[in-house]
Amino acid sequence: CYSGSLLMRDSGAKLPDGAGLNELLRRMQKRRSRTALTSGGEEPVLDSGGGNHSIFAKVFLEILQENRGFLDGYSLFERIRRPVALNAPQTPQYGDIRMTGHEWGDFLFVPKRLQSVKLKKQPSGRIDLSYLQRGGQGDKTIGQYIAHGNGTVTDTKTGLMWKRCSEGLSGDNCEEGKAEEYDYDDAMQRFKNVKYAGYTDWRLPTIDELQTLVYCSKGVRDKESGWCNEGSEKPTINQQAFPNTVDSWYRSGSPSAYDSDYAWYVAFYNGSSYNDYLFRYLNLAVRLVRGGQ
């Protein structure tokens, strides 16, 4: 029922802290999957989803058609479950098939245009994810980033997908509108499971995620401060991947580990990071991310 390729791969039962998508794919290559995704339990299937499809099939196909990279079975289930349950007397189910030799694997859906591309192993044994984002209409490579032509970029080193524009800005070069700023509590409340570019899980980045965007064109002054060397381009970010970035502070979703009244932010005018009481209540710029955690 889908023109893309379906690969059987291992999801990895438990990934270590900090492991990213590269590690996930590496483990997927090693083991078998014996799992099932069904439209529901014993409830009747409703053939009223449109296009001669049931509601379940319609949602299933729409998600796969929007998929630009890889999509594992459990993530597919998470995206299918709610819209089907809200529109039909069915609750999709996902789980292991008993007595079939399951090895904690999972299914991996990849668009048809990428079928002929093979997973490439790097010398370190890590997997190059960038192939998953190539070949899409409007996609182009910008350093370590893949710009998808829909206002998003994927970092091939971390696997994170970012909005190219700061909140409040839009356009091909983020030239339209005005960058919006939020205090910590307002941002945390507002930016949960935001819908954009076909995804519904956009959120505030953690401080560690936000720090990965810092780019010091002249190198780092010292590791402790994280400040970029004098003469580095400002703002200290890949300005082709993230045009019109505010040359100032950006808010993260990370409170201080020592005092919940403090909050972390990154200063893109010099590449440094701080956690401060005052800046929890000041209004700072925001850039959303999805994936990771």
Image (cartoon, grey):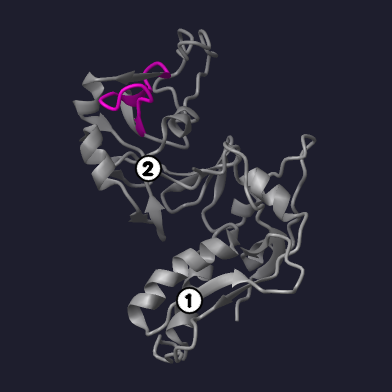
Closer to the camera, 81 or 250?
A: 81
What is the quadrant of the N terminus in the image? bottom right
Closer to the camera, 49 or 114?
A: 49
In the image: residue 245, left or right of residue 79: left
* Residue with the mark numbered 1: 92
- Place of residue 183 in the rendered image (x, y in percent of width and height, measured from the top left): 21, 32
Asked where in the image residue 31 lies, by quadrant, the reply is: bottom right
Label 2 is placed on what type of residue? Leu
Mark number displayed over residue 147: none
- Place of residue 110 in the rendered image (x, y in percent of width and height, measured from the top left): 63, 63
Is 266 a magenta residue?
yes
Decide which of tag 1 and tag 2 comes sooner along the chain. Answer: 1
- Place of residue 214 in the rendered image (x, y in percent of width and height, measured from the top left): 47, 25
Q: Is residue 50 visible?
A: yes
Few, some or many residues within 10 Å of mark 2 (<14, 14–19, 20+): many
In the image: residue 284, left or right of residue 84: left
Residue at disc 1, secondary structure? loop
Mark number displayed over residue 288: 2
Residue shown at the point (25%, 33%) measured from the top left: 184
Is 254 a magenta residue?
yes
Picture layout, residue 210 above or below residue 236 = below
Picture layout, residue 24 above or below residue 219 = below
Label 1 is placed on what type of residue? Pro
Residue shown at the point (58%, 57%) measured from the top left: 69
Asked where in the image residue 43 lies, by quadrant, the reply is: bottom left
Provide the residue span drawn in magenta.
253-272
- Place of residue 114 in the rendered image (x, y in percent of width and height, measured from the top left): 67, 61
Q: Are marks 1 and 2 in contact (CB under 8 Å)?
A: no
Residue at disc 2, secondary structure? loop
Residue shown at the point (40%, 85%) measured from the top left: 49
Asked where in the image residue 262 lies, by quadrant, the reply is: top left
Few, some or many residues within 10 Å of mark 1 (<14, 14–19, 20+): some
